[in-house]
Image (cartoon, helix red, strand yellow):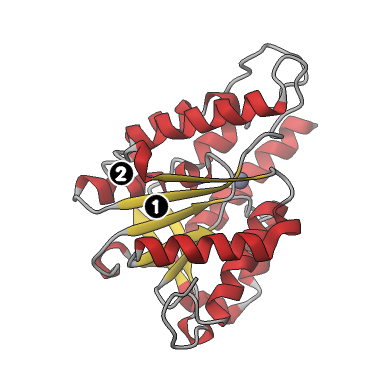
Amino acid sequence: MFSVRRKIKTALNGVLRWVFYALATEAYATLPDGSLFIIAPHPDDETFGSGALIARARQEGRKVRVLIVTDGATSTPSQQMPPHVLAATRRGEAQSAAKILGVDETALIFLDYPDGEAEKHIPAIAKDIANQLWRHNPAVLFSPYDLDSHKDHRAIAKAIDWLCQEGKITIPVFEYPMWFWPCGAIKHLFSPSTWRTNRRISTQGFLSQKEQAIRAHRSQCENITNEPNWSRLPSAFIKESLQPYELFFEKPRKQAKEKAFSS
Ligand SMILES: [Zn+2]
């Protein structure tokens, strides 16, 4: 029964993806010159959400910085790997994945907020993000989408939203969907005003690099302790992340007041 349900969900996700791709406009050529700043709620979202974009930008010599908000310490229960060890493991995996995508570890920023608790820290996270943006002055920002079903992703989308409304962010913001299929996608379908914001970026030439980077997040893709209750991402989820395009939703600029970054 479970596998039938999984097959139906995979088929529905596949159809929805192609609807979104068909109605999105190609965005890479329209990105402003300058550096890219990627915000990941957990150590791996940057790879799943925008790994091919990162590899492409780095190949063209663009500076890419990745800010990882939480420590990822609670992705799985484990008797053998306490949360602080899992957090350190995931930090190392994020560094390995970034290297595969062409990003030096000095361009990674770890905020180390507790995994699963971003909602309790939205004002502090917003302040930290504003400080980092002020320091690095990127040309474009990539961040999680607020229709993701993961509460940390939604909390960080709220922090970005607030920064846009306060005029602390005035550069283009592209939100990437992760835990979006199929529920978030269906909700998005019923919000016609958001259709104009659909963007896609081709992954052609960068998918094998992206897949290698995804596999570098071993604790998320494999059972690294062989414990029966180890929680890892289903192989179907990994496969579904390797598509001809990465999808983004550009945040409407009208939300931003015309002010510069400030700390
Ligand atoms: Zn995540």
- Residue 168 appears left or right of 104: right
Q: Nearer the viewer, residue 160 or 213?
A: 160
Q: Secondary structure at mark 2?
A: helix
Residue at the location (78% across, 16% down)? 79
Image mark for residue 178:
none
Q: Amino acid at mark 1?
A: Tyr
- Residue 28 appears left or right of 80: left
Q: Quadrant of residue 177?
A: bottom right
Residue 213, how many percent across, how many down?
41, 32
Q: Secondary structure at mark 1?
A: strand
Q: Quadrant of residue 83?
A: top right
Residue at the location (67% across, 28% down)? 84
Q: As drawn, which residue projects farthest toward the front?
A: 263
First in residue order: circle 1 vs circle 2: 2
Q: Amino acid at mark 2?
A: Ala
Residue matched to label 2 = 55
- Residue 136 appears left or right of 4: left
- Residue 55 appears left or right of 252: left
Q: Quadrant of the N terminus?
A: top right
Residue matched to label 1 = 245
Residue at the location (45% across, 60% down)? 132
Q: Residues within 10 Å of mark 1 (few under 14, many from 20)?
A: many
Q: As drawn, which residue projects farthest toward the right?
A: 1
Q: Nearer the viewer, residue 37 or 239?
A: 37
